[in-house]
Amino acid sequence: MTERRRSIPKETFYNLPEEKQQLLEKIAIREFAAFGYDKASINRFVDKCQIAKGSFYQYFEDKKDLFLYLITRISEKKLKFLSPVFQNPGKYDFFTLIRELFMSGIKFAADNPEITLMGNWMFKNKSHPIYNEIVSIGLQNAQNTYTELLKLAISRKEIRDDIDLNFVSHLISSMNVSAVEYYFQSVKGEETGKGKFDENIIGTVDLLIDFIKYGIGTKESGGNGND
């Protein structure tokens, strides 16, 4: 039986002071943002961190372990960024809620240019094995979230009750990824690592939300449903 691969740092990493952990994370994000996954260098990373190369392997199994750890940390940071939207989902109707989630995801990318460049590399290298590993996990988590939101929307008669929950939640999750991907690919200032939020994308997101609304919304919500 194949041994399950680690995707978190070793315990020795967590024994470091929090400030040291944050410094290593910051330098690692800069390395991957500047060079992408394949060209990122452990030697360059440890040199900038001013640690011995042997210390790196006390903290992480390899470069992939470090990259997956960073993705986990970025996901946690993004979830915290989105938390105001999730604090009171009943405050919004379903379509307003997902619009807020879409826009918050794009604003998070704009506010974190180095993270944006990491994402940009992934979306430009979809055939890379690590892309499928990361995106498949993220899509499943997002799909679970949207499934619960869809159930709530059905109970409030905002969307039709004859939809396939799994299919629609997968579709919306994929659209969300595509919206962020579009931002990554059109981000300005990539050469200097500076992201810029383009207000024009708001109209594009609104068109996307209208597309979803008229597809699964009830008449009461303004869609073309049969209810």
Image (cartoon, rainbow, N blue to C red):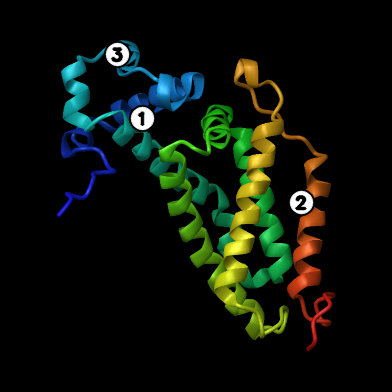
Position of 109 compared to 213: left or right? left
Q: Measuring 60% from the left and 41% from the top, which residue is drawn there? A: 108
Q: Earlier in the sequence, mark 1 or mark 3?
A: 1
Please tell me whether mark 1 sits on a helix, a strand or a loop.
helix
Q: Give the amino acid at mark 3.
A: Asn
Q: Mark 3 — residue?
A: 43
Disc 2 to disc 3, how far (Cα)?
A: 42 Å
* Visible residue check, residue 13: yes
The residue nearer to you, when weighing 178 against 197, is 178
Q: Is residue 187 above or below residue 143?
A: above
Disc 2 to disc 1, how far (Cα)?
A: 34 Å
Position of 137 compared to 124: left or right? left
Name the spot of residue 116 as percent of width and height, x first.
57, 32
Q: Quadrant of residue 164?
A: bottom right
The residue nearer to you, when weighing 15 against 9, is 9
Q: Quadrant of residue 83?
A: bottom right
Q: Earlier in the sequence, mark 2 or mark 3?
A: 3
- Within 10 Å of the Cα at label 2, are there few (<14), some (14-19), or many (20+) other Cα atoms? some
Q: Quadrant of residue 149?
A: bottom right
User: What is the quadrant of the C terminus in the image?
Assistant: bottom right
Label drawn at residue 22: 1
What is the tally of numbered marks visible in this picture? 3
Q: Mark 2 — residue?
A: 205
Name the spot of residue 211 as percent of width and height, x first.
79, 63
Q: Are circles 1 and 3 on residues that touch, CB within 8 Å?
A: no
Label drawn at residue 188: none
Q: Measuring 63% from the left and 16% from the top, which residue is drawn there? A: 191
Q: Give the amino acid at mark 1.
A: Gln
Name the spot of residue 189 as percent of width and height, x first.
69, 20
Please tell me whether mark 2 sits on a helix, a strand or a loop.
helix
Please tell me whether mark 3 sits on a helix, a strand or a loop.
helix
- Within 10 Å of the Cα at label 3, are there few (<14), some (14-19), or many (20+) other Cα atoms? few
